[in-house]
Image (spheres, rainbow, N blue to C red):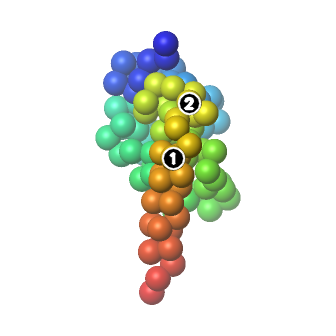
Amino acid sequence: MAKNANQVRELRDLPNIGPVLADTLRRVGIETPADLTAAGSVEVLLRIHRTIPDDKACVHKLYALEGAIRGVRSNDIPQGERAKLWRRFQALCRKDDRP
């Protein structure tokens, strides 16, 4: 069984987090698995979206982040929960576009 974000010290030790995503997380202030857990997957993807314009915020990255927090592969998150996460992210992005 994979370890969740509270059980490891390095981002790359989490499921779904490779060297590129770990680097991206550090660029938005997420240095440790505990930082990721504290912020949550939606907030972290928003940070990426707002901070790194050339990094496309996508549904797969959101699921990877959530899976890392839970200690599971992203495709192990139930479909209904994945859809809720994505809707929440999209709603917050729409708020960003308002004057």
Q: Residues within 10 Å of mark 2 (few under 14, many from 20)?
A: few
Q: Position of residue 19 (x, y in %)?
A: 62, 30
Q: Residues within 10 Å of mark 1 (few under 14, many from 20)?
A: few
Q: Is residue 22 visible?
A: no
Residue at image location 40% in from the left, 38% down from the top: 36
For the view shown, which residue lies furthest in the top direction? 1
Up-down relation of residue 6 to residue 46 (above or below): above
Residue at image location 61% in from the left, 33% down from the top: 75
Relative to residue 24, is residue 55 drawn left or right?
right
Which residue type carries mark 1? Gly
Q: Which residue is mark 1?
A: 80
Q: Are marks 1 and 2 in contact (CB under 8 Å)?
A: no
Q: Is residue 55 visible?
A: yes
Q: Secondary structure at mark 2?
A: helix
Up-down relation of residue 12 to residue 30 (above or below): above
Q: Using the image, tell me which numbered label, if any, was put on residue 76.
A: 2
Which of labels 1 and 2 is toward the front? 1
Q: Position of residue 57 (x, y in %)?
A: 61, 55
Q: Position of residue 16 (x, y in %)?
A: 59, 30
Q: Secondary structure at mark 1?
A: helix
Count of numbered tags: 2
Q: Position of residue 41 (x, y in %)?
A: 45, 45
Up-down relation of residue 44 to residue 97 (above or below): above
Quarter location, residue 49: bottom right
Which residue type carries mark 2? Asp
Closer-to-camera residue (14/77): 77
Residue at image location 45% in from the left, 86% down from the top: 99
Up-down relation of residue 47 to residue 2 (above or below): below
Residue at image location 56% in from the left, 30% down from the top: 76
Closer-to-camera residue (80/2): 80
